Amino acid sequence: MGRQLSEVIERPVVVSVQGVSKQFRLRQDNSFKERIVTLGRQGRKHRSEFWALEDVSLDIEAGHTIGLIGHNGSGKSTLLKLIGGILSPSSGTVSTRGQMAALLELGAGFHPDLTGRENVYLNASMLGLSEDQIAERFDRIVEFSEIGQFIDTQVKFYSSGMYVRLAFAVAVHTDPDVLLVDEVLAVGDEAFQKKCLDRIRQFQEEGRTIVLVTHTLSTVEEMCDQAVLLDHGKVLYAGSPAVAVSEFRRVLEEHRLQVSGGIEVARSVGRIVGAMAKPHPGEVGRALKPGQCLEVWVDLRAKDPLSNWILEMRISSATTGHEVYSTDTRRLGHTGEPIVGLRRLSFRIEDAHIGPGVYSIGFVLRDQHETVVHEFNDAAQFTAEENSLYSGSMFGVPELFDQGRVSED
């Protein structure tokens, strides 16, 4: 009943980005001497324009956790800074409502010559707290940051991890309605990262809005309920985190093939479009529990009929790259129809047991002569849950289900 009511109630839009573009001017003359020489008309030849974002429109409703993903230079951090009011758009509008806290870069808002204590008061006041509010929350901020005896030391002597801990502690204790996070948590140690993620989950339970930029795709699948994929300053996809991650991996793979010169071959003969992994039963992004079934969907596409094909699936540790499992359609006795258009397969590994950690799934598509037609590394990821009974890697028995031709719609 509660779920039905929540679906009826409309959530307010807390961030509205409408037709936003952002242009930067890049100088080609880097030294002071070069700039003097190129003053006036000639100086224009040494400038170039770069559009970090082009006509981006996006509405973010209250209570959602949004992941911004894309390759380096795609515009993720620029968009986050526009939302946070750090930058102004070249065109378009950005509207926000509610209290906002931003962790956009390491130590942003900190003055290196001030102590940690002084920077807490400075940074928190910039985020909208009064002096009395800061004093009331100060001890909790210091306790959360684990800075301890260094709180009265100038922050220029802090390590990068200390910067992050103090900056995050200040941000989360301002009780923001919207929290913006740009990859800064990757700098802290593992224990503090877990502490930060626990606080973010608490914010989610309280119905706060979180917008985060991360290169860790498993974090997007696990923590976000929506995702936005940016590519060269444009929104390529907005919606399901699983679909966004799969589409991003496809973009990365196409780029890799373009660099290697193999894109035309892959498109004409056949290619792996994307994949998705999840526990069964369960949702994408949920950790695999010991003894659960691991289900992996993979989509293949061929312009011309591809007969007697073989698809190999490989599972490796995302941390070490060590391969822990592999199987293929031939070993599983599959002799499917020729691939024409889009085709979906699902691998199921029943009673799966695997050591805790993050795992990457890759695929290799071969033709009837066992020549590699297309290889898609890191096509999908999944996380295995902690288990006190064992460590290491051990899997169950695989099954293969051919879903047949899939509609392109």
Image (cartoon, rainbow, N blue to C red):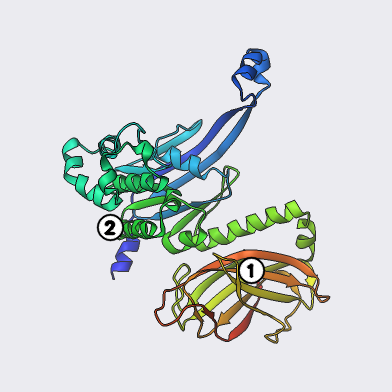
Q: Which residue is mark 1?
A: 362
Position of 278 relative to 165 (above/below): below
Say which of marks 2 and 1 sits in front: 1
Q: Amino acid at mark 1?
A: Gly
Q: Which residue is mark 2?
A: 206
Position of 323 relative to 94 (above/below): below
Residue depicted at 53% across the width and 85% down the height: 350
Residue 392: % across, % down? 51, 77
Q: Is residue 78 visible?
A: yes
Indicate the quadrant containing the C terminus: top left, top right, bottom left or bottom right: bottom right
Residue depicted at 45% across the width and 81% down the height: 390
Q: Amino acid at mark 2?
A: Glu
Tell me: 387 left or right of 125: right
Indicate the quadrant containing the N terminus: top left, top right, bottom left or bottom right: bottom left
Would you identify the image quadrant in which residue 327 lies?
A: bottom right
Residue 385: % across, % down? 43, 74
Q: Are marks 2 and 1 in contact (CB under 8 Å)?
A: no
Report how far apart the C-alphas of labels 2 and 1 lie in the structure: 37 Å
Q: Earlier in the sequence, mark 2 or mark 1?
A: 2
Residue 127: % across, % down? 29, 38
Q: Nearer the viewer, residue 280 or 217?
A: 217
Give SS at disc 2: loop
Residue depicted at 68% across the width and 53% down the height: 255
The circle on residue 351 is none
